[in-house]
């Protein structure tokens, strides 16, 4: 697993979180955000994933 940073908008507000993902795919990032935010995932948009430095 590799550490990634997930940048996204939550209800129009810019946010970011770190997550350990296998491939850094959008699907994995969405699943990680679902675990973090639960039902608020419907308010998440503009997801970008990149490797953490």
Image: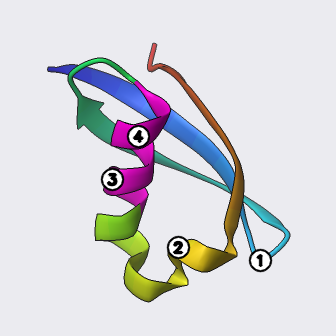
| Of the image marks 2 and 3, the number of the one nearer the N terminus | 3
| Of the image marks 4 and 3, the number of the one nearer the N terminus | 4
Q: Which mark is residue 27?
A: 4
Label 4 element class: helix
Q: Residue sitting at 52 percent across and 73 percent down?
A: 41
Q: Spatial distance from mark 4 to mark 2, Cα to Cα?
A: 13 Å
Label 3 element class: helix
Q: Which residue is mark 3?
A: 32
| Of the image marks 1 and 4, the number of the one nearer the N terminus | 1
Tag 4–tag 3 contact (CB < 8 Å): no
- Mark toward the viewer: 2 or 1: 2
Give the x, y percent position of residue 43.
Answer: 67, 76
Please identify the dominant SS of the magenta region: helix
Tag 1–tag 4 contact (CB < 8 Å): no
Q: Spatial distance from mark 1 to mark 4, Cα to Cα?
A: 20 Å
| Of the image marks 2 and 1, the number of the one nearer the N terminus | 1
Count of number-bearing discs: 4
Classify 21 as above or below 41: above
Label 1 element class: loop
Q: Residue sitting at 31 percent across and 40 percent down?
A: 19
In reply to whether residue 27 is colored magenta, the answer given is yes
| Of the image marks 4 and 2, the number of the one nearer the N terminus | 4
Q: Spatial distance from mark 2 to mark 1, Cα to Cα?
A: 10 Å
Picture quadrant of residue 3: top left
């Amino acid at each position: 697993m590799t550490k990634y940073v997930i940048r996204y908008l939550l209800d129009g507000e810019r946010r970011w979180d770190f997550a350990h993902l296998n491939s850094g795919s959008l699907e994995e990032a969405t699943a990680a955000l679902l675990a973090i935010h639960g039902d608020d995932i419907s308010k998440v948009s503009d997801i970008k994933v990149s490797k953490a430095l």
